[in-house]
Image (cartoon, rainbow, N blue to C red):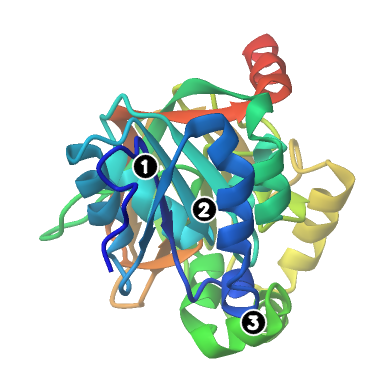
Amino acid sequence: MPDPNASRSQASLVYNPVAGKLFRRPQMIAEAQRLLEPHVGPIRLCPTTGPDTAGSIARKAIGEGSNLVFVAGGDGTINEVIAGMAGSEVPLAILPAGTANVLGMETGIGGHLVRAASQFQDLEPATISLGRMTAPGKAARFFACMAGVGLDARIVRMVSPEFKRRWGKLSYWEGGFAQVGKKLPEFDVVMDGTRSRCSFALVSRVRNYGGDLEIARHANLLSDQFAVVLFEGPSSFRYLKYFSGVLLNSLKGMTGVTVAHARSLQLEANGSTRIDVQVDGEYAGEAPVSLDIAPERVRLMLPRAFIQKMTTAR
């Protein structure tokens, strides 16, 4: 049945009905709609219809006149919508409903969809730069939070969607511990003309990692560069030391770790060994890949306190 408000609706909510929290509590969409409509008017609901559909749905909503887009889902759905809106002046507000909720946790929006909707009046638009991944023979792929190459992307590839949906963040911890004792494949990183070798490269726009940890503590979402952390060595046992460095905020200066800023990097496989890549928590293929700051940007609705904090830190 047609929505009688569709013709006058100026806001659209793109949501993933099978995202972790929405899959268990689908009524949260109606709750969020009820909280938001007093502030923005009628909201047109736009459910995704499968993987890789959220971006095109957001673009269509803008083409049909939406001047504000909400996205409800996990990091993957949010990434798709951000990519679909890259270069647009229409603001985007996120309603976290996934496993890690990296962008929500980073910015102070949090990880609860309904609570985020109730605090919409405390947000204001900020223009942010996006990361861009390019690989031979593939279209460029945008990302808002991070790209991971090597160890963490291997874990992302190995965790099944069903296991992730059932166990949430524990699925990644289980995948990580499964790598202990294994030899990790290494690859080359070319950054600012210097070549180095590592087994895990984190190229990040955010400090938050996985919703719980801060690895790239020198990241700033409002800057126009990446925060880079490179971890050397094929021994997985070395990551026990690296993990302690993450917990104690002592990665900078630690042997085997490089902490830097960059606007572009090239990541190249060594030999025939598979080197996995992930962007914003979703598997994105294999190296070789190039990462840079894209010319396209996006307007994101962010808490005023976060904008002030990041602006001061620049």
Q: Which residue is mark 1?
A: 190
Q: Which amino acid type corresponds to the residue marked 3 in the rendered image?
A: Gly
Question: Is residue 193 depicted above or below 246 in this figure?
Answer: above
| Mark 1: secondary structure | strand
Name the secondary structure under disc 2: strand
Q: Nearer the viewer, mark 3 or mark 2?
A: 3
Task: Indicate the quadrant containing the C terminus: top left, top right, bottom left or bottom right.
Answer: top right
Given this view, does label 1 or label 2 mark the residue nearer the observer? 2
Q: Is residue 211 above or below residue 227?
A: below
Task: Work out whether mark 1 precedes mark 2 in sequence or the reverse, and give the earlier one.
Answer: 1
Picture residue at 74% right of the left edge, 73% below the top: 237
At horizontal 47% and vertical 72% (from top left) the residue drawn is 17
**Picture quarter with the N terminus:** bottom left
Q: Which image quarter: residue 123?
A: top right
Sequence-wise, the earlier of marks 3 and 2 is 3
Q: Measure how far apart labels 3 and 1 are at the Cα level.
A: 28 Å
**Residue 92: x percent and y percent?**
44, 36
Residue 201, numbered label:
2
Identity of the residue drawn at 64% across and 82% down: 175
